[in-house]
Image (cartoon, helix red, strand yellow):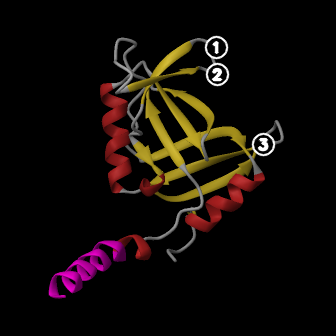
Amino acid sequence: MKTLGAFAFFCALFALPTGIAKQRHCMFRVHAQANQQDTAVFATSVRAQVSGKDVAIEKLPRISEQDVLAFYPYAAANGTYGALFQLDEHGRIALDALSIERRGSFLFVFINGRPITELEIDKRVSDGKIYVPSGLTGTDIELMKKDWRLIGQRKR
């Protein structure tokens, strides 16, 4: 009987953090361009919007929604929305390192599972900001407002 009680205690202990964790509404992922010779374990192929060619991207994102502190949306000329994303310290360091080691390659931004844009790394980015020029929907913006504050607003 004691082992059953101990087992139930440990199950509850491990289940507790998943019940407390904040549920995210918006998915934000930034993947780096990978080497074409990487295996399917590390990279996957996607069609680039700019060139129309199939390119390899890393399967694991370098930056995710957990690295975003705030954002600022705006209406783009083509009827969609764009946004500026402010990253936390972890995201800022990851973006800075990417911009140094991957200069000349591309970053691929996915929001809510959709490819939104690809950004060419042409200089060092040390300010921790990612600019998405267009491609976001009104629904995307509303979901982002549930997860992150607007740039310039106080912390919640």
- Mark 1–mark 3 CB contact (< 8 Å): no
**Amino acid type shown at disc 1:** Gly
Furthest residue in direction front, as rendered: 1
Query: Residue 74 location, x and y as percent?
Result: 72, 50
Q: Secondary structure at mark 1?
A: loop
Q: Quadrant of the N terminus?
A: bottom left
Of the pair 15 and 105, the residue shown nearer to us = 15
Relative image position of residue 109 (x, y in whole percent): 54, 37
| Residues drawn in magenta | 1-16
Label 3 is placed on what type of residue?
A: Thr
Mark carried by residue 80: 3
**CA distance separating discs 1 and 3:** 21 Å
39 within the magenta span: no
Real-space CA distance between mark 2 and mark 1, rounded to the nearest whole angstrom: 5 Å
Residue type of the residue flagged with mark 2: Gln
Q: Is residue 6 magenta?
A: yes
Residue labelled with disc 2: 49
Q: Residue at position x 42%, y 18% from top?
A: 104
